[in-house]
Image (cartoon, grey):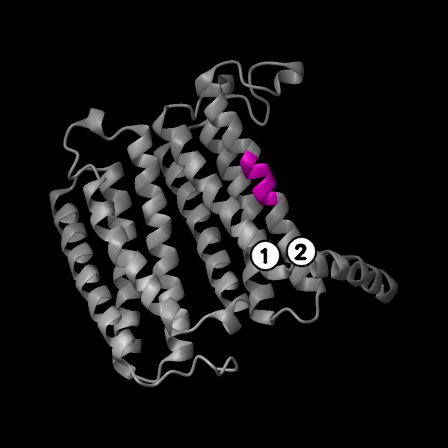
């Protein structure tokens, strides 16, 4: 058993030494995000039941492995990228587990993402075979949870290189995402034809950027700032971001005036909180960015 363990570490080390574990994790994060957006494209174009509702095959070529038309291509390409994302997730987990220098918190986060991956695959299969709204929602939120786990893990890995300027930048990204998130929602685009597949993909890309921005701001802010006001604002921003993302999804799936109003209010408050965080982060004299151990 120890021989196998030593062998796997010996194999993993040259790979990580050549490409770098932080780069591997960042690549995995990009693939997870791309898979989510391609899933949105498949749903928005009505391609979720393409490939003649086959899974994992499609509807053309040898063994029905390839798409026969454009709708099938959307679904097929989503699965194709998801396959590479799955391989990257497994590879990241193996590297995190086998490389002694990887932080145990990072390993735990990545392994959790790996455990969720087969669940996500089963949910993806069920979206093709059943296409029920409950399954679609579970498929989406499981993907988002995997994305969040890898954002947090990536922030941990890049911690030595992140300072308070990255907090300001992450808050700027979050603040810039909010008006776009609302403007691209069905609340602003009252004509259903305006809420096109392209618009939906852009809105969900903004959603992922919003989540990533808040997570990075909160994590790096707690590492690099002594000012409790900054930390408090970042904690409030994290809570509001979760509300905005959840209610934004509800605005897409259902029409509920009360929830829609709450979504707009939460977005506006989060925007103000981000501006406050940007102001405080730029004027705070305490900078512990040179203390990676924090």
Left or right of 238, for residue 262: left
In the rendering, at what x and y percent does residue 190 appear?
14, 32
Q: Of helix, strand and loop, which mostly describes the magenta segment?
A: helix
In the rendering, at what x and y percent does residue 25 appear?
57, 56
Name the one closer to the observer, 185 or 170.
Answer: 170
Q: Is residue 184 above or below residue 279?
A: above
Dot 2 crowding, Cα within 10 Å, few <14, some 14–19, many 20+: few
In the rendering, at what x and y percent does residue 15 appear?
73, 56
Q: Residue at x 54, y 38 (%)?
A: 122
Dot 1 crowding, Cα within 10 Å, few <14, some 14–19, many 20+: some
Q: Quadrant of residue 241?
A: bottom left
Residue extending farthest to the right is 3
- Residue 129 visible: no
Residue beneath disc 1: 23
Q: Quadrant of residue 139?
A: top left
Q: Residue at x 59, y 19 (%)?
A: 66
Left or right of 288, for residue 21: right
Residue beneath disc 2: 19
Q: Is residue 123 above or below residue 213?
A: above
- Contact between labelled residues 1 and 2, with CB atoms less than 8 Å apart: yes
Left or right of 33, for residue 187: left
In the rendering, at what x and y percent does residue 164 appear?
38, 74
Highlighted magenta segment, given as a residue range: 81-86
Q: Residue at x 45, y 18 (%)?
A: 70
Q: Is residue 56 above or below residue 176?
A: above
Measure the C-alpha gap from mark 2 to mark 1: 7 Å
Image quarter in which the N terminus is found: bottom right
Q: Is residue 220 above or below residue 67?
A: below
Q: Residue at x 44, y 35 (%)?
A: 38
């Amino acid at each position: 058993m120890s021989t196998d363990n030593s062998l796997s570490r010996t194999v993993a080390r040259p790979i990580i030494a050549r490409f770098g574990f932080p780069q591997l994790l960042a690549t995995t994060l990009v693939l997870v995000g791309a898979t989510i957006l391609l899933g949105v494209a498949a749903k928005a174009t009505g391609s979720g039941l393409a490939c003649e509702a086959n899974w994992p095959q499609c509807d053309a070529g040898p063994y029905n492995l390839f798409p026969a038309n454009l709708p099938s291509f959307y679904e097929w390409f989503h699965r194709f990228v998801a396959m590479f994302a799955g391989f990257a997730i497994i590879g990241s987990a193996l590297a995190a587990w086998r490389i002694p220098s990887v932080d145990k918190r990072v390993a735990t986060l990545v392994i959790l993402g790996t455990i969720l991956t087969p669940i996500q695959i089963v949910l993806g299969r069920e979206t093709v075979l059943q296409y029920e709204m409950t399954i679609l929602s579970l498929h989406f939120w499981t993907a988002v949870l995997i994305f969040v786990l890898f954002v947090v893990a990536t922030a941990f890995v890049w911690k030595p290189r992140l300072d308070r300027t990255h907090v300001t930048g992450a808050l700027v990204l979050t603040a810039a995402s909010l008006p776009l998130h609302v403007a691209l929602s069905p609340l602003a685009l009252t004509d259903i034809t305006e809420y096109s597949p392209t618009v939906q993909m852009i809105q969900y890309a903004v959603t992922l950027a919003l989540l990533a921005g808040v997570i990075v701001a909160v994590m790096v802010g707690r590492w690099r700032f002594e000012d409790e006001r900054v930390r408090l604002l970042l904690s409030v921003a994290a809570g509001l971001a979760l509300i905005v993302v959840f209610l934004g999804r509800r605005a897409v799936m259902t029409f509920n005036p009360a929830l829609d109003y709450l979504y707009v209010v939460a977005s506006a408050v989060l925007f103000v909180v981000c501006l406050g965080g940007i102001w405080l982060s730029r004027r705070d004299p305490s900078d512990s960015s040179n203390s990676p151990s924090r």
